[in-house]
Image (cartoon, rainbow, N blue to C red):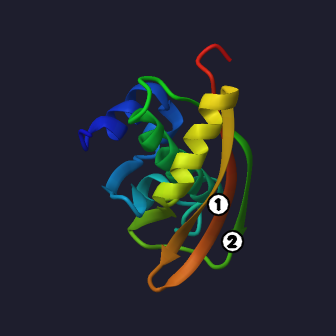
Amino acid sequence: MDSNYLNDFINEHLPSISASGVELESYDKEHIVLCAPLALNHNDRGFAFGGSIFNIALTACWAALHMECHKHMEKPNIVTRDGQIRYRQPCDDKIIRATCRLPNERQWEGFFAHYEKTGKTSLSLTSKIMHGDEIAAYFDGVFVLLGEDS
């Protein structure tokens, strides 16, 4: 898959995420990493703004699902059903990075089998924002893949 696909999709379809400078840093079978500059996502104290951290972390999980679904269908219809974040410490790294660990091959097979059978399915994903070697925030979300007519 073209490595620019996700960045182009964000720029065209997700204006608030695009405005925060979120970009794909890396993507493989195990992880997806999104990054965004602190310069566009800071609060009055110079730390990453909590809302920005939430959006970047959520987008990493959504992107993980979107990238895999795009391998199976042209326009995946993905919505967020639930999302919560736990902030552990402030982050003032110049680049904010959100990492989401992808499901393994067997989990993906079950996910898509359920979708084929019912026309929708859901998946729980977790991402984390690091500050140096320490975790700044954990995000847990539930995402739903809906049929194209939904």
Q: Position of residue 2 (x, y in %)?
A: 23, 39
Secondary structure category for the residue under label 1? helix
**In the picture provided, is 36 more to the left or to the right than 134?**
left
**Dividing the picture into quarters, in which one does residue 45 lie?**
bottom right
**In the picture provided, is 2 more to the left or to the right than 18?**
left
**What residue do we see at 43% from left, 38% from top?**
18
Residue carrying label 1: 50
Q: Position of residue 82 (x, y in %)?
A: 76, 47
**What residue do we see at 48% from left, 49% from top?**
64
**Which of marks 1 and 2 precedes in the sequence?**
1
Residue carrying label 2: 87
Q: Is residue 142 above or below residue 16?
A: below
| Quadrant, the N terminus | top left
In the image, 16 versus 119, the foreground residue is 119
| Quadrant, the C terminus | top right
Q: Position of residue 106 (x, y in %)?
A: 52, 56
In the image, 44 versus 109, the foreground residue is 109
